Structures are given as structure tokens and as C-alpha cells.
Amino acid sequence: MAENEKRKIALVTGATGQDGSYLIELLLEKGYEVHGVIRRASTFNTHRIDHIFQDPHEKDLRLILHYGDLADANTIRKLIYKIKPDEIYNLGAQSHVRVSFDIPEYTANITGLGTLRLLEAIKDFEEHTGKKVKFYQASSSEMFGAAKPPQNESTPFQPRSPYGIAKIFSFYTTKNYREAYGIFGVNGILFNHESPRRGETFVTRKITRGLANIAQGVEHCLYMGNMDSLRDWGHAKDYVKMQWLMLQQEHPEDFVIATGLQFSVRQFITWSAAELGIALEFVGKGAQEQAMVKSVSGDKAPALKTGDVIVRVDPRYFRPTEVDTLLGDPAKAKSRLGWMPEITVQEMCAEMVAHDLEEARRHALLKAHGYSVAVSKER
């Protein structure tokens, strides 16, 4: 950076999440000063950003963490006035779709009203200081819900979960503040995006982690919900680049971020198993469906033999209202911004399995030497 060039300042909510960690890496590479908002917890919850964390006693800090919560409007407002950011990326949310049925009020408060609190603070800050702030809202393909695919920026929303409903509130709040107050606010409508940093209860990570543990004898069976669901999966590292690109434009616009390709949950299970040298055979239908080992090759699955049943369906993991098919149309992003995903879903799956296999091997080694290995499971 040239001496006379001002360093951009970014504020990122959800800084310790999957997207937050990749976005912070990207912003630091581009020379930003980054302020991340994290929630206070009694245990350390910064493992996704520990590799880029800077000791606050160091000079010339470029990554600074702040305690905050999207339910706390006063703290949000104070942070914006203190930091004076050029860009704000709102990635914070209660983001688990199935869990949103169990805690709908909390989901609406954080995922929906949290965006309103941020935009109100930005409006107040701009009115009092005259400084403009660019705002990115992480919208979701779950807003489309039951809408017929492929889904693009013009597709009507038909949400099928409290999470999807809350995201629609955030989407239109961002659009309204853009049109009513001239705020540079944009929505990135992200289709499913994954990585080794994905939360362990999200379906792709649940699959790669569960199968790796089963292959090493740490667990015995993977319990799934609807394996017929069709999704458009991309890599989070690709998608955060698009988030940054959207705030570098002269005029604010909303964009779908997707690959334009679609696969079933069952297919993702098959890919993950193949990375471990396991060929599967699926038998039965609906709640009775299960997958057994057809053959095993290589040395990645020493705990398995032909005929072992390692995947079963558990109806508890079905949503009260299902989203059967999501398929994004990223044509606008490709034509306007020149954005293209670089990592295929198969490459992403292989990366996730390799990451989880390494951890599973450590657990298996401990177990072999008589140590008790506690593997957290989805409740």
C-alpha cells in the first residue's frame, strides 16, 4: 500500500463463522483493517480465525475483535461510531434452517431484526457524520423455498422455514433502506456454500465428518434426514470473493451467488464415501432407506467390511416443511461482475473429507490406546 493511500476499514459480523473467516482472510490480503464482531462465550469460539488472530498488544493491528451481538442495538451503534467503517458485511445470523423451527422467535430476532438494527445505526451514522458506508447483507437461497428452479434475482420468494422468512425480512429491509435513505446496501443471495470450516451440524459437514469417523471406527452409523433434497453447492472461499466484489461497484445491486449445478444429498454421501475408498449400495425408500458397504479399497476405512450398514434415515431430521430443490442462476453475477466459481463441488467434497479424516485418525489413535473419545453428535 502506498504511503498516501488510505487503508479501508471493514466491520464484519459473524466473524468467527465459516464465511466470516474466509472473508477476513480475503480482506486482510487486500490491505484492509478488519474489525470482527464476536459473541461472548465461556469457551473459546475463535478456532476458525486463530491462524490470523493478532495479539492486541502488537503495533499496527489489522484484525481487531469486538464483543457484540445483533440483538444489542446500542453496542452495534457504538461500534460503528467508534470504528467508522467504509464497509460492513453482515454475516451474523442464527443460520441453521432445521433449528429455526425449534427457536423461531430467536431466529427472527437475530437473523431478521439484527439487520434492521445495523441499518438503523448506519442511517444515523451517515446523517450525523456525512460519511457513507457500504453494507452487504448475507441473504439466502432458503428465501426461495418452494419456488420453481432455476431461481434468480427475479424469482418470487416462497419460504418454507422461520429462517427463510427472517432472511426475507432482512432482504427487503436492506432494499428499503437503499431506496428510502440512499444507503449503499446490497443483498448477496447465497446458495449453499460449504468448506472444511462448515459447522458440524450442517448436512455436508455432518456427512464428511460422520463417514470419516465411521471409516476409522470412532462412530458406527450416520443418521440422515431427507436424502432426496437437491442443492446447488459451492465453496465458501469462492463466495466471499463475490461478497467483496459487490461492495466495490459504483451502484448497489443484488446478486444471486450460485454455481448453476445441482446434486442430491445422497450424491454427496456417495462422493464422500468414495473419497474414503468406500462404495455404497442404497436400499429401501423414505424413512426405511439405508446405505451399506458394497466394497472397500485402500487404507482409509480400516474399520469397515462389506455388508456393514453405515447410513440410516432418522425422521427426526426431516423439516416440518421441506425445501425439495434449490438451483441458482448466477448469470447476472457472471455478466455484470465477471464472477465464476473456481472450486467444483467434487473438489470441495474431497477437501472436506481429507480434513475430517485427519481428525478421525487422531481420535482412532487415542481410542486404540485406551483413551475415551467423545465425539459430539447432533441432538
Image (cartoon, rainbow, N blue to C red):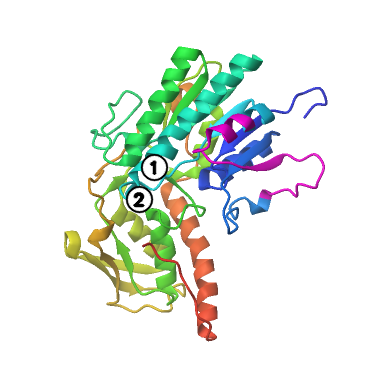
Residue placed under numbered mark 1 in the picture: 107
Q: Residues within 10 Å of mark 2 (few under 14, many from 20)?
A: some
Dot 1, how many residues are within 10 Å of its Cα: few (below 14), some (14-19), or many (20+)? Answer: many
Q: Residue at x 42, y 24 (%)?
A: 173
Tell me the quarter of the image containing the N terminus. Answer: top right
User: Could you tell whether 89 is left or right of 93 in the image?
Assistant: right
The alpha-carbon separation of the residues under discs 2 and 1 comes to 9 Å
* Labels 2 and 1 touching (C-beta < 8 A): yes
**Residue 318 sits in which quadrant?**
bottom left
The residue tagged 2 is 99
Highlighted magenta segment, given as a residue range: 52-78
Q: Is residue 34 left or right of residue 114?
A: right
- On screen, 324 above or below 125? below
Q: Looking at the picture, how far across and down is residue 77, in whole percent? A: 59, 29
The mark nearer the N terminus, 2 or 1, is 2
Q: Amino acid at mark 1?
A: Thr
